[in-house]
Image: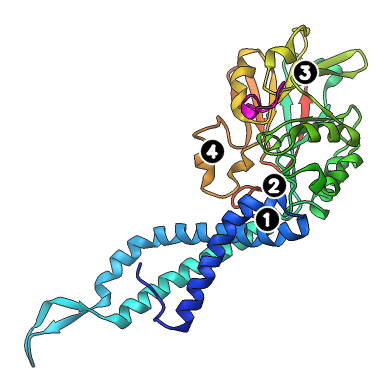
Amino acid sequence: MRGTTRPGRARRWLTLTTVVLAVLLPLAVTLGRGLPNPVAAPLDWIAYSWLGVAFYAFLTLVVLEPVRWALRRWTRRPLADGPGAAVVEEAVVDPARRLFLGRSLAATAGVVALATAGTGAYLANSPPRVRRVPITLPRLDPALDGLRIVTFSDAHLSATYGGRRFERVVELVNQQRPDVVAIVGDLVDGEVAQLRGEVAPLADLVSEQGVYFVTGNHEYFVDTRAWLRHLPTLGIDVLHNERVAIRRGSASFDLAGIDDRTAASSGIPGQGADLDAALDGRDDSRPVVLLAHQPVQVEQAAAAGVDLQLSGHTHGGQLWPFDHVVRLDQPAVEGWSRQGPTQLYVTPGVGFWGPPMRVGATPEVTVIELKAP
């Protein structure tokens, strides 16, 4: 599409603004984690918000391109071959019409982009919805019927997400009166020193039988070991390729957790998903619920006879239409599905990564209610 502004001061200022916004994004990516939160927050908010707006402006312009082509003849004025002569079929471009069309399409793209990004920002920063999902496990003892596993993922605590918004997540979890709380990865996007205050509300989680955590891929972008030392001080049990028994009276099932699938390539000794180690020696007569950050890890879970896997990672796509891209790598984007003999539930997460917005992907705290057959 041709320029919609005439040469002059306005165009120079708009060009400069666009260049500055474009430069802020690589600065936020490269410097964001090394800056104090009060400095990083405005940088990240501006840079990533601009990215979201620019993406939807580009998408809208792509959709409008056929409209421009359909109207391109309207931007031409016919030529007449002298006074009183018949109109010649060939025409010359009418600059006024072309400018009006260009500005109209650009304004439409701007309005759509700003409205979409604004709605997405409001949704991403609103309290998560609570979704209740009953799941029947064929081997579950009737004494465990109704046991509640409250799960969430992908908080991505950072300079742009935390504070009161994360406190509300903890409050929502507690309101569900969980028997078990399961945090399935990508909790943080920064170091302990930066996010100590943001993660502190986790200490307020109340659960009958514990709060459990497994790593996501973003835990390996920072000092993983420091976080694995810090989380237990908040009452969080890290399941590192291991399992625990969840009991009610004499009845029980196994809750297992494995590292993220990227852990093995992180270069950190001892890290790497090992489902065999997590399940070694277990009683096969009772069900097992597996916490694994990425849905694709269900391939191993199904081969091992896992009854239910709880995952996150996808954000439900976060920004439509990226949910279709996610399907190229993951077997499910959001919600319940059956993967062979294993049931899979993918929670869309409570936070965001990159643009501080969610379009077509509502943040969620999930209450898994186990049912006996």
Q: Which mark is residue 232?
A: none
Identify the residue at horizontal 87%, vertical 45% (top origin): 201
Label 2 secondary element: loop
The magenta stretch is 259-270
Label 3 secondary element: strand
Do the numbered discs 2 and 1 sit on residues whose CB atoms are within 8 Å? yes
Q: Callout 1: 10 Å neighbours few (<14), some, many (20+)?
A: some
For mark 3, what is the residue? Answer: 242
Q: Position of residue 20 (x, y in %)?
A: 55, 66
Q: Earlier in the sequence, mark 2 or mark 3?
A: 3
For mark 1, what is the residue? Answer: 123
The answer for how far apart the CA atoms under marks 3 and 1 are is 36 Å
Q: Earlier in the sequence, mark 4 or mark 3?
A: 3
- Quarter the N terminus occupies: bottom left
The answer for how far apart the CA atoms under marks 4 and 3 are is 28 Å
Give the quadrant of residue 172.
top right
The answer for how far apart the CA atoms under marks 2 and 3 are is 28 Å
Q: Is residue 275 above or below residue 358?
A: above
Identify the residue at horizontal 26%, vertical 81% (top origin): 94
For mark 4, what is the residue? Answer: 326
Q: Earlier in the sequence, mark 1 or mark 4?
A: 1
Is residue 4 in view from this perspective?
Answer: yes
